[in-house]
Amino acid sequence: MRFARITHPASLNFPMRRFRLFYAVFVVLCLLSVEPSALHSQIADVRKSVVRISTTSQDPDYKVPWNAGSVTRSIGAGFIIAGPRIITNAHVISNSRFVTVERENDPKKYAAKVKFVAHDCDLAVLEVADQTFYKGLKPLEIGGIPQLASSVSAYGYPIGGERLSVTQGIVSRIDFQTYTHSAVDSHLACQIDAAINPGNSGGPVLQNGKVVGVAFQGYSGDVAQNVGYMIATPVLQHFLKDVGDGHYDKYVDLAIQTFRLQNPAQRAALGLKDDDTGVMVGSVVPGATCDGVLKPGDVILAIDDNRVASDGFIEVENDRVEMAEAVERKFKGDSLKLHILRDKQEMDATAVLKPAWPYLIQANAYDVKPRFVVFGGLVFQPLSRDFLEVYGIDDLRVRYFYDQFVERTIFLQHPEVIVLSQVLPDPINTYLEEYKNSIVNEVNGHPIKRLEDLAAAFAEPADYYVVKCIGQGRPIVLERSAVEAARSRIKKAYNVLTEQNLTPVPSTPPTDFSPAVATTANAGLSSGDGAAAR
Amino acid sequence: MRKIFALVLLLLAGSFVLPANLHSANTVRPVSPRTELSVVRVSSTNQDYDFFRPWAKKNPRDFHGLGAVIAGNRVLVTAQLVANHSYVELERAESGQKSAAKVLCVDYEANLAILQPVAENFLGNLSPLELTLDAVVGDRVNVLQLESNDALVSTPGPITTIEVGHYQLEGAAFLLYKLSLALQYREGSFTAPVIKDGKLAGILMRFDPRNQNVDVIPAPIIAHFLKDLDGGSYQGFPHLGMETAPTRDPQLRHFAKLPAGTGGVYVTNVIPNGPADKAGLKTGDVVLELAGSPIDQDGNYEEALYGRIAFVNLVTTRSFAGDKLPLKISRDGEMKALEATATHEAAGNYVSEPYIVDRPPRYYVVDGLIFEELSRQYLKEWGGDWQKQAPQRLVYLDRYQSSIVPEGRKRIVILSQVLPTASNIGFDDLKYLVVTQINGKTINSLDDLSAALTKPVDGFHKVEFEEYPKQIFLDAAHLEENDRTVVESYSLPDLKLLD
């Protein structure tokens, strides 16, 4: 639900600087709102439903992309629902190589497998092959959204001990929140005031014996006290319904920016009445859901027959929620009815919903191997959030391409932004160190739109490989004979196990994405300046 | 370099004072009689413009320096000392006599300024300092400072390096002396004359007390400045409008078909309509020789006085605006001879001006929306770390303007901020947005904006931006009334400044 985020322009300038929510595997807190006796019976039941999850994971190494990465271990929580299936957070099992689950009152560790994982809403389904695991377990029922100020109890395995922990608190806020696991998605979440700590993640939050949320993130104590978040059950239900066909399709996205219509002159100029209805479309991401359906300047009056208020809220089940909610409940391929005002004429439009990939450059990636190409000791990697954070690049152009990738439709010229990330020093590249962090535009006259283009250009026989980078007037020149002579030397010296990995990752542009299609790019000043590269 | 700059700012602001310790510092000795050297105290009260509230000046701040008396009843100081001056005053150290001064000429790129006392005969018996142009590495020079008791202090030290180095403004690179000496802070340490054998070898531009590095604007640059000035209308230091890279890389040399054993620099960028562009130089050319001097693979030439030094010195120090400089280039292996006319690029010729000093920023306020023209000075409102702190879109536009701003675009007009009022409700969060059109007219300057606002469409002014939210509308019928509200609520002296 990206467009909810970008209706707040304040967050636009520095997408990297988000809240540092800390979410490293912590367990939810349960609040004992019920009477003591009822609580005791609830706890007894919960023991049959909550599991402890131990994960051994291997995180990719973006600085040495041919390496498998370092191995870490972590603890999280999960719970059993009908199926029976084990629900936990995606971040509890992301990059996992081996997962075990343990039940209360059972000494055995059971090997588990990840059946489904949804990194955009931080949820996963695990399954255990050994059927004896499920014996005596009691699936939890999934409830609705708890009332504000009502008490809830969170269960899990946070730091401080080995055994099941329960904490309690009240529901302090129900709102869209950025899910820090991906860093670019926002969905409904409930804020609770119970202490949430690493190890709580994936645990159930209960009210009256039903799951009303999945604990998943919170602020570290030095930022804010008693602020923890749980995934709201509509998100969990959406995930379960999505995987019903055996495949996770991801959340869909309108991929537009909207502007609140609270200014009287703005409303009058657009031909609107003074009835607090409608938001203006600011931009439409080319190739995404609303491309060809909406235009900048259109006013969205209603979405699936829900009146859109001038602040971008709609009314759902007697509650005012962001209009994103209308899309949140839908799936890939579903259609969405839009009632709009275009050039002062009311009209209806239909959008067929799909996920939008360009945003994913700014998303954390999991369960992937870094894409890269090594040639002549030069390491080329696509720009992504993980890449940027690991290298800590503060080069202005690289940062601009990252920050403005969607906003400035840079993805039309550079569906994948290929950066010269490292120079493995060798006589062949001794004068090239200063070209680090350059963005590749062209090799031997072939435009480089994605990493595959680069690999293909280097595979083509030529006397010289002339690499032109954006804004660098001096090309990088590699002589084929020199590259061939240096190849085994560099591989050996730097232990380069493989010279390239082209396996797609979520932010990789779809193979059918053709930049030529979308010519509606900003013709303005500063869209990706590939064309102007000198 | 940035570190050094920060330290100089501290000195400038006078926020700390190092104790003067004449007796223990054996490198420091009083000069007597002090009248043998012609220096005067300079105090400048400067007020920077506030680019976020462009109708206002910031608080006045005092800066002090020691000026060198030169021929023609003039005093030489750094331009920095008098940047955005409201009042400049000279003081004779030995008599305490004071005079207001006017700034005759200032060059912020070369960081030099010439002052003249208003009072007649103020410099009286002080004999003007002559320039010494032949200082070389290893020469010992003296940095002059004044004690608060008016004792003239001379700190000797060697010239350790002579190179083309960075001046105060980004991108400004000129000949520079570097000294190594233990200078102590004294009132007036800033803009201190540097003397060799009783003659002016340069003036101190910045000082890094931790590393005891002193950067000096050298006499050859001062001489260039004075000669340019004496020629009538001041032109400024010339450039060629190109960027280059070394050609040491043998693979690049083979590719560019450069014979072994030759030098040359690879042209990486040619500024459109600049001297190099007009001369026919292209990206990818290799410049082998400039103004008769062969250029080596690192971009240096052999200078009689200094040995190898960056070839840009041939343009800045050795040439004047209007000089014709022959170039020998290699293009795809073929030798060619070109001729470029060195020119000075005035700050105003850039789309995003590199500096705006001694004049207020242009602005236009309508319905509480503050419109300005993007400049580097505007971005510097974000402080010393502006390149990281300022909105990256704007920093990017400024930095890469020569390659991304379409030709014909005079200025980039931005909506800087909004002064919230009832009529602009809903717009109050908008800021730092690039304006593309108003009422269908392309906006290339605030003058365009002013003209476009006289022609509303259907009772509204449509303002279009590059960025989200792309377009807003203002009520044209009530604009005057709304503007009055803004003027009253926020005490604006004027709604616009377009001069």
Image (cartoon, coloured by chain):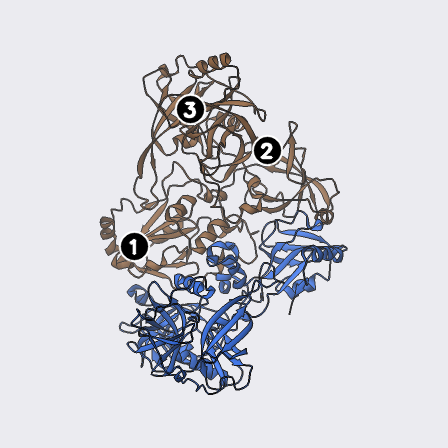
Chain colours: A brown, B blue
Q: Give coordinates of residue A187: x percent, y percent.
A: 53, 34
In the rendered image, which residue does mark 1 sit on? A376
Q: Secondary structure at mark 2?
A: helix
In the rendered image, which residue does mark 2 sit on? A325
Judge whether A156 appears above or below B346 on screen: above
In the rendered image, which residue does mark 3 sit on? A156
Going by the image, does A145 lie left or right of A117? right
Disc nearer the start of the sequence (3/2): 3
Going by the image, does A96 lie left or right of A310? left
Dot 1 alpha-carbon crowd within 10 angstroms: few under 14, some 14 to 19, many 20 or more: many
Mark in the foreground, 3 or 1: 3
| Dot 3 amino acid type | Gly
Instruction: Determine the CA span between mark 3 and mark 2.
Output: 29 Å
Q: Secondary structure at mark 3?
A: strand
Q: Give coordinates of residue A237: x percent, y percent.
A: 52, 25
Q: At 59% across and 67% down in the image, what residue appears?
A: B360
Q: At 37% across and 25% down in the image, what residue appears?
A: A53
